[in-house]
Image: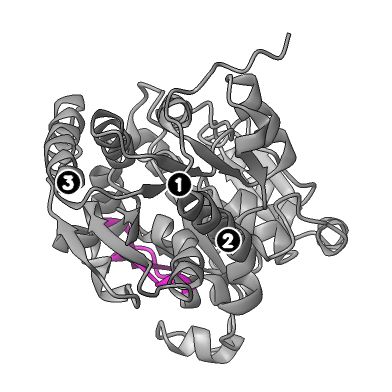
């Protein structure tokens, strides 16, 4: 019996992994077992207990702390994750574990896999996000990993540049495009009614901490909220921040602001189907989340991308980058709502694949495991 594990720690990551989990489990039989490991903020009441949104069979739950007020909190979370994942990997002896992206929990899981000689198959390597700690975490997981599934050609080349053999690096695109094609199926009226709104103009927004900066979260949020107040005719539908350092403070400020700003409504999580359906009909997407860079352009919706968190990611012409001051955000929103920019958005072609990533990732993962020829003594691939 061959065993493949998939790890999910956050709502956003689960949304990207869910089509892969479904594809993998189509092939479960007496020779192959696919196990889902749920950890991180999925199990936290403060972050909405998003384990309730997981539709697939859950095989393991790994509870770790999710406090994120300081650097010490993050290290403590990682330390506990490292111990618990090591214990699970030793017991289960997985033939491979799938990890996505750049979360600190996944770095701990990757180190545990390395220590237990468990092959890592990594999704979304090679991207760059220069404003976040995710940048070095993502590249670190790449070097631990055996198989690589990048979301675009630029990222594929970066993974090879990091010394990974091109024969083990595959650009199948982003599973977020798969989701847009199959999951974003709610009508505008139904999606709005599900969050208590009638017909209106609205924007979807998410603001995460910029973890490579030492600036005040309070100051950044004050500017962000001032910009929202400048557009009283638009409803702003905000999803809360993740568990990075400063995320909890952002969520406190959002909750407090929603009590005072009439056109702001805040949700801990919208779920992938409702989130993408709302995005599909929004006037624009506002904030600094990767979803504004990857998913939004594929829906031909404008993105206002604030600050440096996503700096370095491959971008489409529909994305408007701006600074963190209220004035800069307001100017970018006005540009996003202009007829000229809406015409630009209509012609954008996403560089993140054709919507068939999950089936290719699953097929290559299963093929690699069943061939039973994985050699973790990787040679560094020199490009010079």
Q: Is residue 26 magenta?
A: no
Mark 1–mark 3 distance (CA, rounded to whole Å): 37 Å
Dot 1: element: loop
Quadrant (top left, top right, bottom left, bottom right) of the C terminus: top right
Q: Is residue 93 visible?
A: yes
Horizontally, is 205 left or right of 31 in the view? right
Give residue 337's quadrant in the image.
Answer: bottom right
Q: Is residue 30 left or right of residue 62?
A: right
Tell which tag, 2 or 3, sits nearer the viewer: 2
| Residue drawn at 50 percent across, 58 percent down | 366
Mark 3 crowdedness (10 Å alpha carbons): few <14, some 14-19, many ≥20: many
218 vs 188, nearest the viewer: 188
Tell us which disc is closer to us: 2 or 1.
1
Picture coordinates of residue 236 (x, y %)? Answer: 49, 66
Q: What residue would you read off at disc 2?
A: 363
Separation (CA) of disc 2 from disc 1: 15 Å
Task: Name the residue: 32% across, 36% down.
Answer: 110
In-image side of 190 versus 54 (left or right) = right
Could one spot residue 229 in this view of the protein?
Answer: no
Q: Along the polypeptide, which appears first: circle 2 or circle 3?
A: 3
Q: Earlier in the sequence, mark 2 or mark 1?
A: 2
Q: Residue at x 49, y 23 (%)?
A: 378
Which of the two residues, 44 or 147, is positioned nearer the viewer here?
Answer: 147
Where residue 123 sits: x, y (%)? 51, 46
Q: Which residues are magenta?
A: 256-272
Vertical order, 183 against 383 (above or below)? below
Q: Which residue is mark 1?
A: 372
User: Which residue does the numbered mark 3 point to in the structure image?
Assistant: 66
């Amino acid at each position: 019996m061959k065993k493949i594990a998939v790890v999910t720690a956050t709502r956003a990551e689960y949304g990207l992994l869910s089509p892969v989990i479904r594809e993998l489990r189509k092939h479960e039989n007496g020779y192959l077992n696919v196990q889902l490991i749920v950890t991180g903020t999925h199990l936290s009441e403060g972050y909405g207990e998003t384990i309730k949104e997981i539709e697939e069979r859950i095989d393991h739950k790994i509870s770790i702390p999710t406090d994120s007020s300081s650097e010490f909190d993050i290290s403590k979370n990682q330390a506990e994750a490292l111990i618990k994942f090591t214990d699970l990997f030793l017991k289960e002896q997985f033939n491979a574990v799938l990890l996505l992206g750049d979360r600190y929990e996944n770095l701990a899981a990757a180190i545990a896999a390395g220590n237990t000689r468990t092959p890592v198959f990594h999704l979304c390597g090679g991207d760059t996000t220069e404003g976040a700690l995710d940048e070095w975490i993502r590249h670190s997981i790449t070097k631990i990993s055996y198989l690589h599934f990048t979301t675009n050609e630029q990222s594929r080349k970066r993974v090879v540049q990091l010394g990974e053999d091109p024969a083990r690096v595959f650009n199948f695109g982003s599973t977020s495009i798969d989701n847009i094609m199959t999951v974003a199926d709610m009508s505008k009226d139904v999606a709005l009614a599900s969050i208590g709104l009638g017909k209106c103009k609205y924007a979807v927004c998410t603001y995460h901490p910029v973890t490579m900066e030492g600036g005040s979260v309070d100051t950044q949020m004050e500017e962000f909220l001032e910009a929202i107040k400048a557009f009283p005719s638009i409803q702003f539908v905000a999803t809360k921040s993740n568990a990075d350092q400063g995320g909890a403070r952002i969520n406190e400020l959002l909750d407090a602001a929603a009590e005072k700003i009439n056109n702001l409504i805040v949700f801990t999580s919208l779920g992938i189907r409702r989130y993408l359906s709302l995005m599909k009909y929004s006037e624009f997407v506002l904030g600094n989340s990767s979803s504004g860079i990857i998913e939004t352009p594929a829906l031909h919706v404008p993105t206002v991308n604030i600050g440096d968190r996503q700096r370095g990611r491959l971008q489409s012409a529909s994305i408007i980058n701006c600074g963190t001051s209220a004035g800069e955000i307001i100017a970018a929103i006005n540009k996003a709502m202009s007829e000229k920019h809406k015409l630009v958005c209509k012609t954008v072609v996403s560089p993140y694949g054709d919507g068939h990533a999950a089936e290719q990732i699953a097929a290559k993962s299963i093929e690699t495991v069943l061939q039973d020829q994985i050699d973790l003594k990787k040679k560094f691939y020199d490009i010079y």
